[in-house]
Every structure is written in C-alpha cells, then in structure tokens.
Image (cartoon, rainbow, N blue to C red):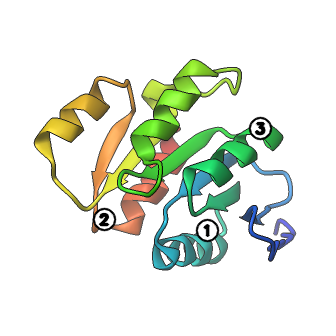
Amino acid sequence: MQKEISMYQKNQEEAMYVNQNPKKSILVVDDDDNIINVFKRFFKLRNLNVSSYFANNVDKAIKILETHHIDMILTDLKMKPMDGVDLINFIKKHNNYNIDMKKNVFIMTGFPEKDRLKEICQKDVAEIIQKPFQLSKIEKLIMEK
C-alpha cells in the first residue's frame, strides 16, 4: 500500500494534498469553499494517485501555476473579480506551463449560459462540466487523462 503524505497549508496562498509519487497533479479553482472542501475530501478518500492544489480565485491559481507543475485544471466559470475564462486566457497567453488545454482543462459551471459556453468552447478546453456533477465523472476524467 502506498504511503501517503497529507499537507494542508493554512495560509491564503494555497492548500494541497500531496500523494507520495503521484502520477498527476491537479489544480481545482473555485470560489465556493464547499466545492473546494468536497474535492479535498474526495481526493483523500478515493486515494487517487494525484497531488491536488486548490485556489479560491484566479490570482491564487496563477501563483500555484507559477510554482508547481500542474497536469490538469478544473476551474469554475463564475468567479469574481476574474473568472474561469480569464484563467484560460492567461494560460493560453503564458503557456509555458505545458498544459494541453484541449485535453486537460475543464470548466465547471452551474449556469447554462449558451453564449458564454460557446465562447468557452472556442477557447479549446477539454470539456464543460455542468454542476451539480457526480464525483465519479471527475474520477473517470482523472484516470483517463
């Protein structure tokens, strides 16, 4: 059984759960603390072979991207002051993070705004995930990528 290391940083910059010898690193960006907490518990309980990083806004997400290797991003669409599209635009502009946007960037949204979703699809993201969603869907995405 693989030994795990839990590491939660209490500062405002980031919180993460690090699995020893992870196969993937995942960044979850959502301004809803309940969503962040669900993902934290989910990654820990499912014992997925990932290191996970969490940010409650785009600025914190960018800081994590600048300091950690990230393989996959799950970001909320509606956040303030910047939203998920702003994060996608930043990554596209500064894609020295080596993230394959078409395969590894996912937008989560509870708002089915057709025009906004069309704009997002044109940004070359992998998929738009409608909230509420089943965590089994997220697990499947992680295992497939």
x then y, percent, for residue 14:
74, 62
In which quarter of the view is residue 85 placed? top left
- Say whether disc 2 or disc 1 marks the residue closer to the N-terminus: 1
Q: Which residue is denoted by mark 3 in the rendering?
A: 66
Whole-number angstrom distance, CA of label 3 to CA of label 1: 22 Å
- Tell me the crowding category of disc 1: few under 14, some 14 to 19, or many 20 or more residues within 10 angstroms, Cα based: many
Using the image, determine if residue 115 lies above or below residue 75. Answer: above
**Crowdedness of circle 2 by 10 Å Cα count: few (<14), some, many (20+)?**
few
Residue carrying label 2: 133
Q: Earlier in the sequence, mark 2 or mark 3?
A: 3
Q: Is residue 129 left or right of residue 26?
A: left
Indicate whether 36 appears above or below 112.
Answer: below
Q: Could you tell me the amino acid type at mark 3?
A: Glu
Quadrant where the image shows the N terminus: bottom right
Which residue matches tag 1? 43
Residue type (three-letter) at the residue carrying disc 1: Phe
* Element on which disc 3 rests: helix
Q: Earlier in the sequence, mark 3 or mark 1?
A: 1
Instruction: Find the residue positioned furthest to the front.
Output: 81
Name the one closer to the observer, 70 or 138: 70
